[in-house]
Image: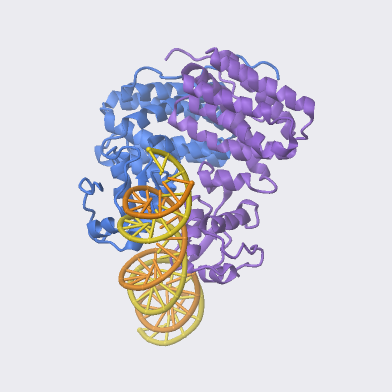
Chain colours: A blue, B purple, C orange, D yellow
DNA sequence: AATATAATAATGTCTGATATTTAGCTCAAC
DNA sequence: GTTGAGCTAAATATCAGACATTATTATATT
């Protein structure tokens, strides 16, 4: 029961990455249920007019992202969303490239950012080097310069991502830094949904500026608070229901 | 200048996964510096007496974990630790299998756990289902049963990992759940370093029990505090310098 | 000296054959 | 009837060798 029908026909001379992207999008957009059996290699070869080698490479990429599971003899089955490797760079790009973002993912990634990002900003305020600050600042300047021009929407998105990613990096922790990969899908989804009214954009820029200033001044508490305000604006633009789960630890007892 | 010398000889009939593991370990254990050029495919074929296909599969796995970067014409170079995909399941297994854990990684992963895990426990206390509780409890029981017997050290480690992982899962957030992949290397490193004195083990079990109880009773604050105590014990066993960076958010202002 | 060009060396791809694993089936034995 | 061994079919995994593409380096040419 290989449902080859709802696979799009990619461009004839699609390279391996493009092929992987096309296949990944069919999964990320929810066209398969968890446990479904994926088309066989030879069928995919015919469908995309590609060599078995290319198909296998593409499938290996999907497999390494946890989208499918392949076993000799059985075939290829589609894995559950809980098994996806959200922090693989491929996933970051694929998810950001969806025409309609995955609703559950947008929601849960944002819940994560809401809890984690204020703390990450604190870390950045404590650990940022001059180089880190330069990166954050240049990203912010880029955001400002590209804010008004609708032509430069993509550039603005990239600067926005670079801004937040630079903060994740400035914390100088290998684990937290990787979380920066979640930003692209999250921010792209945000821009797609929000309405780009000029006043909101000005307000958003001002909130970002305050984060930058707090980190520059080495004020963790202020950085936390400013980041919470950025996220609050984001939540409003995403039209998410308030603050799903906020990070509210009680006082730390001496250990 | 292909430094083939410090590659171990794998078992002759090593399958693709074993090959990838052997190659990965040479990188994870720090035998290459960032930017070093990795041996060429054909040299690896000779060295391991494997077909080029197998070698390429293994290298593709390493590449998908961010350990190496391959470009046609140039060759294969070793990537920096900052580029490693710490949350790939392969990495979880490989890192846990090192004879001597990577010191920087152990430190930074623990810094992350110290900040994140109390919050994750809060989430679990709020969202855990009966099934989640059953998993946590059965893992805890396994820890108790295997605590005394040195023969069952590996089983004890697995139950320990399962306990914490079940808590990450119980938060029912796709992002936080993935962080559970960091547990295996972290906990294995812990067990390898700690001295397994009976009184410390009893104390550790008691601290775990309190986390379980707090989650069962749906008491987020208690769960947070109990988890902090578990981590404090872990820090002591790891002989880490106090609490590198603790999560201490200020009060949330109304947004 | 700067620029174009050719040679080289590495990874990427194609093709077709073969090996291995898994699921399902038949059929005999208890 | 149920169990088990063995066979068959179908899928992925691997092998082998030729060829294509890319990036570097050396070599000419102006």
Instruction: Say which of B83 and B132 sits in front.
Output: B132
Q: Looking at the figure, which quarter contains the C terminus of chain A?
A: top right
Residue at 46% x, 32% y: name it.
B175
- Which image quarter: residue A125? top right
In this image, B182 relative to B244: left or right?
left
Q: Position of residue C25 (x, y in %)?
A: 32, 50
Instruction: Say which of B36 and A255 sits in front.
Output: A255
Q: Is residue B253 above or below residue A222?
A: above
Q: Is residue A63 above or below residue A180?
A: below
Q: Position of residue D3 (x, y in %)?
A: 46, 43
Residue at 61% x, 51% y: name it.
B28
Q: Is residue B184 above or below residue A210?
A: below
In this image, B43 relative to B253: left or right?
right
Residue at 63% x, 29% y: name it.
B142
Q: Is residue A77 above or below residue A218?
A: below
Instruction: Say which of B11 and B77 sits in front.
Output: B11
In this image, A102 relative to B19: left or right?
left
In this image, D8 relative to A12: left or right?
right
Q: Position of residue B242 (x, y in %)?
A: 72, 28
- Residue B240 shows in the view: no
Residue at 30% x, 54% y: name it.
A40
- Which image quarter: residue B14? bottom right
Instruction: Say which of A155 and B215 sits in front.
Output: B215
- Residue B232 shows in the view: yes
Numbered-mark total: 0
């Amino acid at each position: 029961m290989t449902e080859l029908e709802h696979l799009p026909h990619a461009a004839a001379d699609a390279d391996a990455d493009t092929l992987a992207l096309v296949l990944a999008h069919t999964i990320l957009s929810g066209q398969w249920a968890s446990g479904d059996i994926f088309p066989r290699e030879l069928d995919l070869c015919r469908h995309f007019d590609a060599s078995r080698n290319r198909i296998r490479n593409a499938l290996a990429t999907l497999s390494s992202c946890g989208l499918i599971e392949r076993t000799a003899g059985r075939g290829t089955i589609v894995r559950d969303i809980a098994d996806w490797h959200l922090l693989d760079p491929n996933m970051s790009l694929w998810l950001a490239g969806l025409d309609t973002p995955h609703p559950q993912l947008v929601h849960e990634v944002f819940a994560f950012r809401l809890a984690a990002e204020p703390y990450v900003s604190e870390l950045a305020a404590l650990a940022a080097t001059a180089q880190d600050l330069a990166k954050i600042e240049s990203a912010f300047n880029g955001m400002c310069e590209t804010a008004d021009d609708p032509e430069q929407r993509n550039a603005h998105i990239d600067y926005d991502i670079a801004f937040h990613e630079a903060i994740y990096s400035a914390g100088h922790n290998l684990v937290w830094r990787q979380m920066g990969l979640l930003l692209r899908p999250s921010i792209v989804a945000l821009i797609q949904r929000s309405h780009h009214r000029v006043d909101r954009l000005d307000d958003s820029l001002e909130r970002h500026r305050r984060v930058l200033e707090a980190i520059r001044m080495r004020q963790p508490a202020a950085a936390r608070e400013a980041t919470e305000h950025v996220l609050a604006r984001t939540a409003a633009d995403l039209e998410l229901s308030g603050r799903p789960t906020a990070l509210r630890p009680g006082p730390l007892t001496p250990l």
